[in-house]
Image (cartoon, helix red, strand yellow):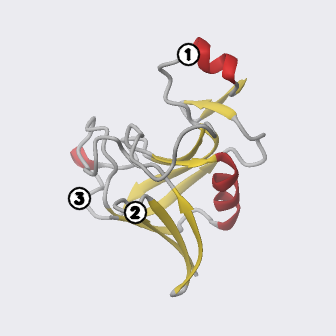
Amino acid sequence: MIRLVVKSVEQTLYVYDNENIIKTYAISSAKKGMGEIKNSEQTPRGRHIIRAKIGANMPANTVFVGRRPTGEVYSADLKRRYPERDWILTRILWLSGTEIGKNRLGNVDTMRRYIYIHGSPDEVQMGQPGSHGCIRMHNGDVIELFDQVDTGTLIEIN
């Protein structure tokens, strides 16, 4: 059974098959650190599941806003036109907390905070915090991960 573990201190996502690590990916979690509170721009900790997979078969660098493709494909020109955008590209794995009061329901609800694992521009450095709360990956990596997991896949974030 596939499960995921994100270690924020290492800025690494581990893919496990039972107890064996089968793949590791460099990631970028929140610039403001770890935390569960709504509007904190922090990455939530604890047990989660993948609630939804969005973007199957879309081209790499597809731009998403509100979980919908905009019809844009990320480019240097698009970056110049919208320098402040927090780019959500290629694929989205929408997370949902499983621990009531910690990362589910109320003011700490991961899903209602729109926390994803998603693609980002390839020039974004992985291995260091920098997101607004989500877990960012390079596009090729998020495509590969997207194809390995199903909705309901467990993910532990610490």
Give percent across and percent down for residue 95: 46, 54
Task: Note whether 106 is above or below 141 in the view shown.
Answer: above
Instruction: Work out whether residue 64 or residue 112 is closer to the camera in this orientation and state it.
Output: 64
Q: Nearer the viewer, mark 3 or mark 2?
A: 2
**What residue did someone put label 2 on?**
10
SS state under label 1: loop
Which residue occupies 47% across, 62% down?
A: 12
Q: Which of disc 1 and disc 2 is earlier in sequence? A: 2
SS state under label 2: loop
SS state under label 3: loop
Question: Left or right of 30: which side holds 116?
Answer: right
Question: Left or right of 143: which side holds 124?
Answer: left
Identify residue type, mark 1: Tyr
Which residue occupies 42% across, 40% down?
A: 131
Which residue occupies 21% across, 58% down?
A: 101
Give the class, few, some or many, for how many residues have Cα within 10 Å of label 2's Cα (few <14, many ≥20).
few
Task: Note whether 10 is above or below 65 in the view shown.
Answer: below
Give the class, few, some or many, for how many residues have Cα within 10 Å of label 1's Cα (few <14, many ≥20).
few
Give percent across and percent down for residue 76: 67, 22
Identify residue type, mark 3: Lys
Give percent across and percent down for residue 146: 65, 58
**What residue did someone put label 3 on?**
102
Instruction: Work out whether residue 126 or residue 6 is closer to the camera in this orientation and state it.
Output: 126
Tell me the quarter of the picture where residue 99 sits: bottom left
Gap in Å between the C-alphas at discs 2 and 1? Answer: 30 Å
Q: Nearer the viewer, mark 2 or mark 1?
A: 2
Gap in Å between the C-alphas at discs 1 and 3? Answer: 35 Å
Identify residue type, mark 2: Glu
**What residue did someone put label 1 on?**
82
